[in-house]
């Protein structure tokens, strides 16, 4: 398995603060994706960054990718209580047709 | 919007039973996946399929089989359920290689 790893495992912040989650992986990738999961539900796709991209934005989300360090970060700015969820990174490996997911970061935003 | 539907939200079965988990997508996607999710272990791939009647093993295929007779439907089969198969099962699909995944709501399976 080429499962990635998220850091930290859990994060608790006040509403309005920024939240940063990190992901490390081991192999050559075509892209890296971030997903969100509300408790007990399916995952929802947030953003995809290709291996030739270094940074990508979507609303309050900013994702960076450093292929030399095999790492990515997800920044959520001006967090809201509704952002409380688990966040997973997933890597689309070169030569494979499936995504490898990390173990996730549990984010709690306190109103 | 793409819809991926899993037939059951919660399921309780007895050890040794044969269990079928059904997944249907409505957007003509080529690729379909079954994951299981356990606390602290994240999502682990059981099987995936890139075309009708085609299947590939994922990381943890033991104790499972799959069926894809029609493009829109991907079934996960537990041949003889065991307690260590108690888990959340997630189905997903995507139209193309290296695209984003669309997930169903998940089936929480308890094997007693």
Image: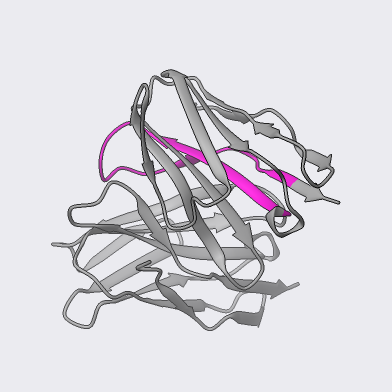
Q: Quadrant of residue B78?
A: top right
In front of the other: A45 or A25: A25
Q: How is the image coloured?
A: one colour
Span shown in magenta: B86-108
* Percent position of residue A20, x then y: 47, 78
Q: Quadrant of residue B95?
A: top left
Q: Residue furthest left?
A: A52
In front of the other: B21 or A109: B21
- At horizontal 29% and vertical 71% (from top left) the residue drawn is A64
- At horizontal 19% and vertical 67% (from top left) the residue drawn is A28
- At horizontal 66% and vertical 68% (from top left) the residue drawn is B39
Give the tally of numbered discs.
0
Q: Is A26 drawn above or below residue B95 in the view shown?
A: below
Q: Does residue B67 appear to the left or right of B56 in the view shown?
A: right
Q: Does residue B18 appear to the left or right of A34 in the view shown?
A: right
Q: Does residue B7 appear to the left or right of A96 in the view shown?
A: right
Q: Is B70 drawn above or below residue B93 in the view shown?
A: above
* Percent position of residue B66, x then y: 50, 34
Q: Quadrant of residue B81?
A: top right
- At horizontal 25% and vertical 67% (from top left) the residue drawn is A55
Residue B100 colored in magenta in the image: yes
């Amino acid at each position: 398995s080429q499962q990635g790893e998220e850091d930290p495992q859990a994060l608790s912040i006040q509403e309005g603060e920024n939240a940063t989650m990190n992901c490390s992986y081991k192999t050559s990738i075509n892209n890296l994706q971030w997903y969100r999961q509300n408790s007990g539900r399916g995952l929802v796709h947030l953003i995809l960054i290709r291996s030739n991209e270094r940074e990508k934005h979507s609303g309050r989300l900013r994702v960076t990718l450093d292929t030399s360090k095999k790492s990515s970060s997800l920044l959520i700015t001006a967090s809201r209580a509704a952002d409380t969820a688990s966040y997973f990174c997933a890597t689309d490996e070169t030569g494979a047709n499936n995504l490898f997911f990390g173990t996730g970061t549990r984010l709690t935003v306190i109103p | 919007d793409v819809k991926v539907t899993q037939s059951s939200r919660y399921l309780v079965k007895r050890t040794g039973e044969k269990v079928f988990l059904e997944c249907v997508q409505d957007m003509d996607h080529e690729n379909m996946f079954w994951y299981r999710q356990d606390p602290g272990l994240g999502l682990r791939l059981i099987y995936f399929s890139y075309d009708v009647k085609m299947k590939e093993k994922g990381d943890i295929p033991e104790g499972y089989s799959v069926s894809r007779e029609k493009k829109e439907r991907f079934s996960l089969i537990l041949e003889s359920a065991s307690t260590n198969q108690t888990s959340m099962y997630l189905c997903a699909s995507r139209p193309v290689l290296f695209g984003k995944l669309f997930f169903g709501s998940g089936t929480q399976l308890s094997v007693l």
